Amino acid sequence: MTDKATLTIGDKSYDLPILKGSTGPDVVDVRKFYGDSDHFTFDPGFTSTASCESKITYIDGDAGILLHRGYPIDQLAEKSSFLEVCHLLLNGELPTAEEATKFEHNITYHTMLHAQFDSFFQGFRRDAHPMAIMTGAVGALSAFYADSLNVDDPKQREISAHRLIAKMPTIAARAFQYSVGRPFVTPRNELSYSENFLRMCFSVPAEDWVPNPVLTRAMDRIFILHADHEQNASTSTVRLAGSSGAHPFACIAAGIACLWGPSHGGANQEALEMLEEIGTVENIPAYVQGVKDKKYKLMGFGHRVYKNFDPRAKVMQKTCYEVLEQLGINDPLLQVAMELEKVALSDPYFIERKLYPNIDFYSGITLRAMGFPTNMFTVLFALARTVGWISQWKEMFEDPARKIGRPRQLYTGATQRDYTPLEKRG
Ligand code: CMC
């Protein structure tokens, strides 16, 4: 097998090394191509470009496979816990019993926020979208935790990573409680990560909060399913922001801002709103026709990488059934979702384009049943994805080949011309 590709432009040929991964497509190394040939490669949307080397997450989109550090996502969702997955993503291995205890302790003892941080929330309007609050609040962490901003110090990088994983649930719960006018709830160290988050979101001072093991497990599983996803838009944003040496809180805030877009994490809110708009099974054919007429997209469907079932969607669907059953909820939107999935999967428009349900299709129904309003859905995604972002950010700093990210362009604007004085224009 060849270990180089040859590209010919006019009468000149250029040899490009081929780099091999442990699995998945090999890559053609074009790093020296511009210097040698005075040509750029052109790939808007990065559909054929590997932007970095990584050992964290592997996706085979045709086969519907997602592995974290080699472990299949369905096994992790079934057998692991979110904090164990955090350790795996950050450090490369599942923790030993001793490491697990230490890691859990580290995260648990970083969940509180500086007392003055709470007054920060009061500056937002009550009806602010919680993602707007998240973007601002996470960026503001650097104003409170300035002792872990030195990105060249591995210890400080680790402390920042632990702080982010630990404090995101506290910030997310405060964004929620603030929007519904309830008092903030202090984290409790004897509770698990997901129990703590649910308690901070749903407990009120007037009565004791009792954990529901099915809901806690569902929350933990939803966090696992969203923990990392290779070089997606928000992760690439975090890496690009970090490549300049920006501190981790700013980089994660940039990732949150990117995630909010409806083509990315914002799709979970939009998918549920779409199901609400469709309303009943009878309205599905007309809605699907609108999709085929390109009036709008079917939210929660399609993926840049998966051209098969999103493996996360299968686990999400199972979790959705479990939660609805536990809560005794007969949500008519589940009927709409199931029928819509059936109609779409048998329609040539979706078959030809390989459009399958993604993780966002069933997550909204589940989260709504658990008591979250739609505008919190993307916040939960951001909370869970924080470990992926910070693991990728950490990996970038450990890579000796790290360089500031600086794409180039195909320029199609005006060529050089002389300035025209105002009186001679038009
Ligand atoms: N509904 C209808 N048509 C679609 C959809 C959809 N959801 N997704 C793609 N298509 C069509 C698209 O119009 C195009 O058709 P044509 O070839 O006739 O022009 C074809 O399929 C290929 O689409 P694309 O836009 O080239 O695909 P992409 O890889 O650029 O987009 C995507 C991927 C996820 C942005 C897109 O599928 C989409 O907008 N889906 C809905 C939003 C959504 O659910 N996003 C969540 C993704 S999973 C969670 C996450 O990563 O954040």
Image: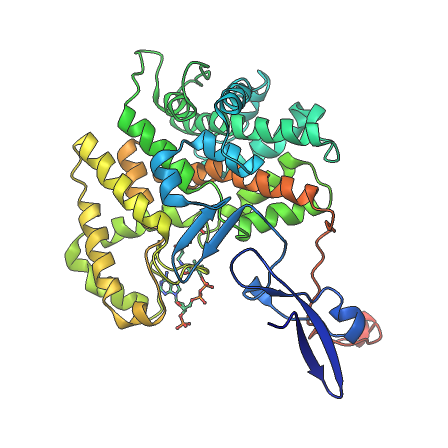
358 is higher (above) or lower (below) than 295: above
246 sits left or right of 343 in the view? right
As drawn, which residue projects farthest toward the bottom? 11
Name the residue rendered at 57%, 24% in the picture.
120
- Name the foreground residue: 130 vs 369: 369
| Residue 406 place in picture, x, y as percent | 72, 57
Residue 38 appears at what percent x and percent y?
A: 78, 74
Quarter location, residue 254: top right
Question: Which residue does the image show at 62% across and 57% down from the upper left?
Answer: 51
Tell me the quadrant of ligand 1.
Answer: bottom left
Q: Is residue 354 left or right of residue 278?
A: right
Residue 75 in percent (x, y) is at: 37, 41
Image quarter of residue 44: bottom right
Q: With respect to residue 323, does 58 lie above or below?
A: below
Q: Is residue 373 left or right of residue 304?
A: left
Is 272 rendered above or below residue 194? below
Is residue 304 found left or right of 152 in the rendered image?
left
Residue at the (44%, 52%) spot, across then down: 262
Residue 208 horizontal/vertical position (percent): 31, 12
When asked about the image quadrant of residue 238, the answer is top right
Please say whether residue 359 is visible from this viewpoint.
no
Query: Is residue 309 in sight in this rendering?
Result: yes
